[in-house]
Each structure stands twice: as C-alpha cells, then as structure tokens.
Image: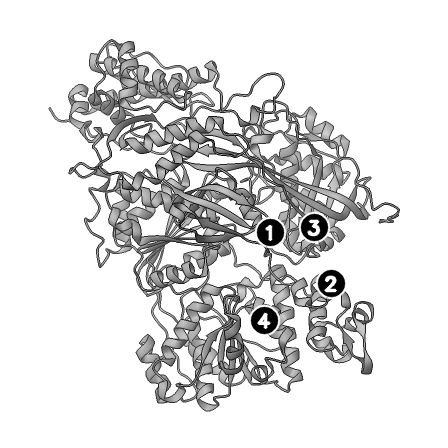
Amino acid sequence: MSTLKRKRASKPSGPEASPPVATASATAPELKKPRKTTTKGKAPIVKTDIPWPEHFKELEKVHRALNVVFTFCCTRKHLATTFDNLKSAVEGNTKKELVVEDIAQIKFLLPKSIQFIYVDEEMLQIHVMAASASMDTRRGRVTAAAEDVYEDLGKKDRIKNTKEVLLFEFIDGDLKKTATKGGKSKEDDFKMPTFSMPQMTKLINKRNEKFTAAVNTFLAECAESGVDAVESIKAQYHPHIPVQTKSPVGSTAASDLPLEIPKERKPIAEIIEEIKASDLYSDQIVPNGHRIFPPQKAIFGDLTFQLSQDLVNALYTAHNITKPYSHQAEAINNLHDGHHVIVSTSTSSGKSLIYQVPVLHELEKDPETRAMFIFPTKALAQDQRRSLIEVLGYMKDALGNIRVETFDGDTNMEDRRAIRNEASVIFTNPDMLHLSILPNEEQWRMFLKNLRFVVVDELHVYNGIFGSHVAFIMRRLRRICSALGNNKVKFVSCSATVANPESHMRKIFGIDTVKLTEEDGSPAGRKEFLCWNTPYKDVNDPSEGRVDPISESAKLFSQLILRGVRAIAFCRTRNICEGLLAAVKSELQKLERPEVVGMVMAYRGGYTLQDRRMIEKEMFEGRLMGIIATSALELGVDIGSLDAVVTVGFPYSISNLRQQSGRAGRRNKDSLSILVGDSFPTDQYYMTNPDEIFTKPNVQLQVDLENILTREGHIQCAAFEMPIKPAEDTIYFGADLPSIADERLLPGALGFYHCHPRFLPYPSKLVAIRDTEDGHIAVVDVTARRNHVLEEVEPSRAMFSLYDGAIFLHQGRTYLVKDVSWERKLAQVELVHVDWTTTPRDFTDIDPIETEAIRQLPESPSRAYYGAICIRSVVFGYFKMDKCKRILDAVEVDTPPLVLYSKGMWLDIPRAALDLLGKRGINVAGAIHAAQHAILSLLPGIVVSMPGDVRTECKVPEKEFMKRESARKRPGRLVFYDAKGGKDGSGISTKAFEFIDVLLKQAWERIKKCGCGAGCIGCVTSERCKESNAVMSKTGAYIIIGTLLNRELNLPEISLEEQETCHAGVETVVFAEEVKPKHGVKIEIIA
C-alpha cells in the first residue's frame, strides 16, 4: 500500500489554544477531518473522530512514560537522559521493552519537539560531573572536585576512539524556576532552580496533548489519502533512527549538500531555493520579506587632465582599471580643479581610487608633497595602505623613493621619528592626530608645511559627540597649517549614503565650499534581501517562544558556506560573535564537514595586534569561507569577494543594517543579504513591517559645535599647540572665543592666550574624543604553561566576562577563567572542552548623588533636576547555561563593583502617579522604563546627539517579574546620564535639561497618538535597550509623563498584549526622596 508523506506544518498567524483533547481511545462511526479548537494561552489541539489503531495507542504509552521519566530527570542535574538511563524506568511504566524504533516513530510525529541523537559519552559525563562538582563552589572558587573535572577536560584531545551514547531530550519546553515562599535566605539566589509538582504536571500534560494532536492529524491525513496509517508510519520513520556520527552512513542533514565546497557556486537564486527545500526551512522568510534588486551596469567618465603613462599602467596592472566610473571621474576632476570633495556612494563603489589618483599624480609632479589619510579604525587604515602600496609597486621608476607608512597606536616609538621625517603618505586615525601629531607640531612642522591632501574616509562615522570632537581636531589642523603658511590643503571625504553629506562635511572641516558627488556609476550585481524570522520552537504553540537566533543563524550560515557562498555574519556584541562562531563549528561537525571548521574565524575588538593582522591576511587572501564579526568590519575594509551577509538580530539602526548589507557583492556578482530576526520587540517589529527596512529615509548626520565642554577642551589643546589670538582664531572656534579666552585661558603678552595650568602638562590626554577606557585586562592562556596573551579586555567588559569560574570565549573556543587579578590587570584562563557557557548575574544602579540645578516644569508642581550621577555595577554570581539556554547551576562570586561617575538629569515621579499605577495594576518598573525610552528616543531631535550618547537604567525582567519580595528597591524616578566624557559628562544631558519640558510634551503626545498595543519603537521601546524592552508599560508611561506635566489623564484601557507581557509583580519601586545639593550650596530654581 502507498504511504503518505508528512506535510510541513504551516506557520500560524498568532497564538492559538484549545480545551482538553479527546483521549486516544475516542471512537466514532464516521471518518471526519480533524478540527482545531482554541483557548487563549494554550496551543491548538486537533480533535478527530477517527479511532486510534492499537499501534498508536502503544506509542502513546511509550510517549507518556518517556515524558514523565524525562521530566523527573530534568530536576536532577547529575542524571543524563540517555536511552540506557531512561530504559528501565520507562519499561517499568509500560510493562514492555523500550526499543529505539518506538522513539523514532514518536520523533517522526513530533520532529520539532524531540532530540534523539548519539553524543560523545565523555563530553556528556564531563558535562554532568562539572555541574555536580560545582555544587560545592562558593564565592567563585572552583573546588577540588571541579578542578579534577577541568583537569580531565584538558586531556580530552589525547583520548581517541571515544564511545558514543544515545541521548533523548524533549526540546519543546523548559521548566522554570519556582519562587520559594516566605523569607529569602542569603543562599537562595545561588541555589539550583527548584520545580513545583503543579509546574511539572502542567508541562507533562502539555506534551501529551501535543502528541495526541500529532496522531490525530496524521490519522486524518492518512484517511483522506486512503492509506493505512500503521503501514505509513512504519514506512517513514526510519530517517529518525539515530546514527552514530562515526558511522560510514552519511547524515540526512548533509545529504543535499555538495560533498566539497564548489569552486564556482550556483546563482544565489538557486541556492535560496535549495535552502527553502531543505529540512532547515519552515517558512522563516516573512511575508513581503524577500526583495530582489536588479543589477546595474557600469557608467564610465573621463578625466579633464592627463595622467602619466606610469600611473595609467600601474592602475591597470594592480586593479585592472582602464577607465574610471562616472562618480570617480567627477570627484577626481573636482579635486584637480582645487575643490574640496565629498563622495557619498554605495559600499564597494571604488571610492578609494578618488583620493589615490590625485595624491599619486601630485607626487609625480612634486616629490615633497605630503598626504594624510585618516581612517576611524586600524583595520581600515591597514587595508587602504596595502591598496596604495600595491599601485606604487608598479611605479618604482617614477615613485620608487616614496615612503608610505602607518602611524597609529601600534607604531613602535623608534619608528615614529623616521616616519615623521621621511614618509610622504601616512595612514592614521583621529586619535593620533589629536594626541600625538598636533601637540607635537614643531616636530611635524615640515610634514604639515608640505601637506596637500587630507583624506577622511567613512565620514558618516563622525557623528554626534565623536563627530564634534573630530570637527574641532580638523579646525586645529587647519589653524596650524595656516600659521605655517600652508593654505593649499585639499580635504577629501568619502561616506556611505546619508541624507546630508555636503553640509556634514562643511561642518566637520569648517570650510565653506564643497563639491558633492553622489551619482554612483559603479556596476552592481543582482542582490537579494531576506527577512528571515527565527521560527517558533513549536509552530502550533507560539507561547513556547522562538528558537535561539544563534543556533538558527549557525545553521543558515553553514548551509551557505558549504554551498560555496563566501559569507560574513554581523553580530551586535562580542559575546554573540563568539557564541555564533562556536555554534557554526558545532554545526559543521554535525554535518560531518570538519575540514571546513578551520575556514571560519571571528573578527572583533579586543584581539591582539598579531591576531588582527593574521585574520585580516587570511580574509583578504580568500582562505576563509566565513567570517563572524562585530561592527569592526562594518566599515569598508576590503576582505576580498563576499557573496552573502547574515545580520544576526537587528543592528540598532537602519543605517547600520544598510551598511552591513552593502558588504556583499563587492565584485559585481550576485549577492545575498539576510536579516535574522531575534525574539526582541524591535526585531519582530521589522519582521512584521519589512517595508520600513527599504523605505525609511537615510539618517541625518549631526555634530554640535556649541557644546561648551567639548569646545573648551579643544580650545585648551589649541592654545597648547600654538598660543591663541582670539581676534584671528574666531574662524576656528566661534565668535565668542574672546570671552572664553578671558574666562578660561591664561593671558600672555601681545594679546596671546595660553593653555590654562589645570590642563597641563598634556591637555590632549585630558580630552577624550572616544568612549575609551584605560587599564585593559590581559587575558592569558596558561594551558600547558603556554602563557600566551589571547586578547585585552576593557575593565567595563572584563567585569561581566572575567570572573573566577567563568567560561571565556575566544575564536569559538571555551576557556575556564582560573584567576583574575584586578591589581595586576591580568586574567589567567585555561582551554577546556565544555558545551555550556556562563552568564553573569549582575545589576547596575544609576543614582543621582548631588543636585546642581533645578528647573520648574511649566504649569506643573513637578521639577527636573541636574547634577552628579553615580553608575554602580555589581556581578554577584553567574549561571551555567547549556546550549538550550537552560540553567545547569547557579554560582556565587565576589567581585569588586565597577563605579563610574557622570553628569545627568532626573525627574522624581509624583506620589500620585505611583498610587495610580498601583491601583491600575500596572508594573511600575515597566512604566518607568517605557517613559525613559520615550524621552530618550526624542533627544536627537532636540539636542545634537546620537543614540547611546545619553543612557538610562534599563529594567531587568528577572527582577521585575519576580514573585517574591526583593531587598533591592529602586527609587521611582526617570534618570538620564551622559555615557561619554567621564565624571564631567559630555554636555548633552545639560542641553537636554534645558529642554526637558519640550521633551516631556513631545513624548506624551507621541504615546497618546501611537496606535500600537503594548508599545513599539514609534513610542516607548528602544532599538538599543540592553534588556531588549522586556519590561515595558505603554499605559504606565502615559500616566507618569502626564502626571509630571500636570495634564488631565484620559486613561486608556490596558491592552491585552500589555497585560500579558508586563504584568504587575511584587513591587520593586519606592517613592524617590529628593537628592540634596552640596552642603552649604543654595540652588535657585529655574522657571
């Protein structure tokens, strides 16, 4: 008899549920199609009148027994749920032998809910032993038992022919930690999760209902097709019988993949169809989320002047260039005519040629010509230097003596003098210009006197407070060159596509006339863009949540590179970057392609200079098939031909997404860009509204030249470099420079002003232009006494990743943190082989400590405050997490707190608002969190700033949704602080304080008019929320802001969505007491 092939379940449009289902023994005289019944909060259950054959009743008994035994074992972390461990208990329940074939049939019916595979026995035992050993771990010190386990881990590579065991797991639902009743002991936070009997029963019943629904559906499908259900399942379950990984039989997952990575890949369109036809695909591409952009032919232009034959030959030999694209020709002609130039075209459009050709042309005419190429990152500078040297290599007769050098923080001190005196072209960054070149202008005088070109690439990076700093650095450079009699400098900038490139360049450099080139003449291949949403763990039960985006991205990434698609994955954080690399390597092993593991590497901040250079070389020479990166490679580093970009989670802004997407297709071939949606509200917003990814306007770049803190710092630096004459230097530092000089500089002879003594001896070191930190922690690998520095980590990051017992990830490998010395700035780690990671348990309190200004809100009794802010972060423990993000253990650690100071503003929430929130049953923390993000989102429209320049305290769901009382109560206030500028702040919150009433009014109106249910990025959620907007109450934000403004509240009904996502728990917020000014200081209230 023919068999019935299972159909892929379609994705539901939203949560569905059902009442209790009929039992397996239900019968009826007629065969009818199954029907779904739903009840809010439960999965859809399929009911049918078709009688169950005896075979399926027996399978149900096995499933129920497995369900009960597995759930019990999950509460005992020392028990691994192997087939052998489960067998006797299940057989005692069913009174029959448990065989692999029965479980394989159950997996056939529930393919997404069960894992039934062979695993390395040693790895499984180590997993269990280490979890058990850590029971005795206290204060982050690994006990002797744990030490033995970790010592064994180091020996694993020497053990051959390890045995594999059969592992069974339900993967469709996890037990949650149960709150304990009564008081809370000191140890409660560090105990393993405990599970209640009702909770276990609920999960068991839920799985049983899913099995019943799956059988009902299968029986109905068989009846409709006229096939025997028993024969059909027996004919189809065989692919679900586990196969040992060392077995010569290939895995079904890899069966549709090429046996070798093809030298010539298929077209992207075919590869997409292949992936859609694979087991990986279950309708992840969202409706209207597949866009195709047609190819674009090249448009060429002509130069208005003659290039030397040597230069023409070099360009052809090095880059196969015979004729410039139209945008290249236009910009080069403008430079030759003496104009400053800004080029704003797509990524990989050949912008570097625009500044290389004029510099080389000028050097041929005058060997004394000097050029300075400024890039925001070291990697980009190295890349562009390599490109220029390649052209110069074919011009040895004409320019054989020209020296091109890198001058950055990695340059040896002994080489710096030679570079200064002999280099014709230097590749540097704004930091070195600020800290080393300009303060030592006497030593650089000859170079600056002959400077003819200043190239500032990636101009869009210089935005917000960083852009303001760079703008003043450029004015300082122009001022010194002018004083040396050099008024011939031409400024050249390149930028990604932005809304205001011309005005932004004028503001950065302080120049009046700029020639803009924005019509892109470069060719582009066919490009496809996919919005790929992480699927639900159970398509019939969205309440289970979505699968891990790292796991989903790893599978997708592996499918691409094994089909010959050279790909890069962009991750939001370093931890995600390392986690994805480990997941990709694991996936490649599962697909039996270990030879490809070494062809995938990570690239992110923190790596040593030697490692960075090695990875860059491997990328450029095409030895890698896959790169996992943070935004360090978002900029235009040429890493060879890329076919695909996978962006893991929405990357904070549309601009970032477009920049990352543009990295694919750099060699005119067809390309692919995929946005993998996380479960966060922002990601899901764009998954639901993919049109906005393509239609939102490009970002407006902004810099603030009126910020007095930024401006004074650079005026002091300028006065140190060369005494200031206010009447002449107003063109660089503003019309009010004379008054600033009188108030803040040291007057000298002849009307000159000098740097104030409080900024001496090195004022540039006191003016931080980036949000950088000193005192990095060196991470040293001490495995087998190797003593090799893996990387250096900033103190603020180290606190959350380097603590005794932590698992530290580097290039996808797992290292156990053995010891951390904050005094010596050293962390010792040892290579281990574990399949779990650690997640810190921490909190950050952001509190005002001293009031410096008070502003009365118009027509309201409420006030806004400004002053000193303390940011205190504490890591008090960590969780051990398995690959499914389940908690294996909870460990206490004792680490020193990280305490930072800044400036900021705050508003104390009126008691009336807190009372109203309580009466309405609204989560107060969620209301505060939503109100803060609503205000922050409007800040760039009022004050020149970038998202992230001002921050707030994000509310943590683990704390705010607790069912028991928390000793850590937070004051009910809205707090905002400068993220940059140290204890004195950046000045942005100062300006925001001046316009706080405007911000409040705009936020209130925005919330009132937004038609969403529980909040969206259009009103109260943030793309940059560190807690993923998990604790949010739109209604609560409306109440808080309305009460602060003293407005009449027309309270809306709380949406059902908000009730479910931000329910009120045990209150964690108390009334805020007023913060006092400094003792003896009286503050007048600003009306």
Which residue does the numbered mark 4 point to in the structure image? 433
* CA distance for labels 1 and 4: 25 Å
Q: Quadrant of the N terminus?
A: top left
- Residue at point 65%, 79% (across, down): 480
Q: Earlier in the sequence, mark 1 or mark 4?
A: 4
Q: Give x and y (percent) for residue 983.
A: 70, 53
Few, some or many residues within 10 Å of mark 4 (<14, 14–19, 20+)? many
Q: Quadrant of residue 190?
A: top right
**SS at badge 4:** helix
**Residue 123 place in picture, x, y as percent:** 32, 34
Mark 2 → mark 4, Cα distance in angstroms: 21 Å
The x, y position of residue 98, in whole percent, is 23, 17
Query: Which residue, given by chain and number where applicable, does mark 1 sit on?
Result: 948
Q: Which residue is mark 3?
A: 902
Q: Which residue is mark 2?
A: 708
Q: With respect to residue 454, does 797 lie above or below?
A: above
